[in-house]
Image (cartoon, rainbow, N blue to C red):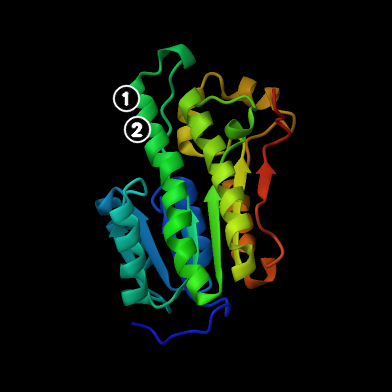
Amino acid sequence: MTAATPPGSGTGTVVVLGATSPLGEMIVRRFHSEGRQLVLADRDVEAVDVLVQALGSGDGVLRGVRADPSRNDDVVDLLDIAVAHAGPVEVVVNAAELIDVRGLMEITPAELDRVMAYNANGAFLVCQVFGAYFAERGYGRIVSIASNAGQGARTIAGGHYAVSKAAVIATTRLFAAELAGRNVTVNAVSPGPLDLPHTRALIGAEAIDRFEDALPVKRLGDPGFIAEIVHLLSSPAAASVTGACWDVTGGLVRN
């Protein structure tokens, strides 16, 4: 266990859920580049272990944990493990998400439950569990990955994904208001289509040029820039930003 750091030092432990997704990994690497203590969480423990080994510990503590954000016990255990093995937590980033492309009228109740539980319930539980811990310490930063789909913009993902991301935004605002007086900020980042492998796979190689041309900015978004925004919102300097949903949508607007 590392030596305790004072709350708000900007050097405390960072927990990232959804750490092995392409965007999650970029966020992890951004924090890792400055030697932060990191605890990486994902449902796929083997993928977490591979990422931990690829990064190496460097100057900080790096640990992988299996965690499903839709399970309250997993979120509680994740916090306990992070504090025990890497020291006091200052930042939690929830980049965990399920994308399940279905036609709106074809989504089954089981598919709706699964996506809502992982994306919406997961965001709520992360804010609740880590928010209570941060409030007790008097400092914390919570950042969730939302989506332009959750704001009624056009999306290539399923309608249940869009509804779950709307819930992420609402959760962000509710917990921001609840925790603002305790020096705890809660924010979200709302990307549009990003230049990631799963985005290109969903669109299809034959349609990617037409898709990009239909975007106002004529290009897919840079996931590395999303990681920079997450890093900025996680800093002590971002004390006056809370309840925000930072849009990086390539010019896409609500329908």
Callout 1: SS: helix
In the rendered structure, find residue 123 and report the number of the disc placed on it: none
Q: Percent x, y for residue 57?
A: 37, 73
Mark 1 and mark 2: Cα distance apart in space? 6 Å
Q: Which residue is mark 2?
A: 114
How would you rate the neighbour count of disc 1 (Cα within 10 Å): few for under 14, some for 14-19, many for 20 or more? few
Q: Which residue is mark 1?
A: 110
Q: In the picture, which quadrant includes the C terminus?
A: top right
Rendered image quadrant of residue 85: bottom left
Q: In the picture, which quadrant includes the N terminus?
A: bottom left
Q: Percent x, y for residue 116?
A: 42, 34
Q: Residue at x 56, y 54 (%)?
A: 175
How would you rate the neighbour count of disc 2 (Cα within 10 Å): few for under 14, some for 14-19, many for 20 or more? some
Mark 1 and mark 2 residues within 8 Å of each other at the beta carbon: yes
Instruction: Residue at the far bottom: name it.
Output: 3
Q: Is residue 187 visible?
A: yes
Q: Residue at x 41, y 28 (%)?
A: 100
The amino acid pointed to by label 1 is: Ala
Rendered image quadrant of residue 146: top right
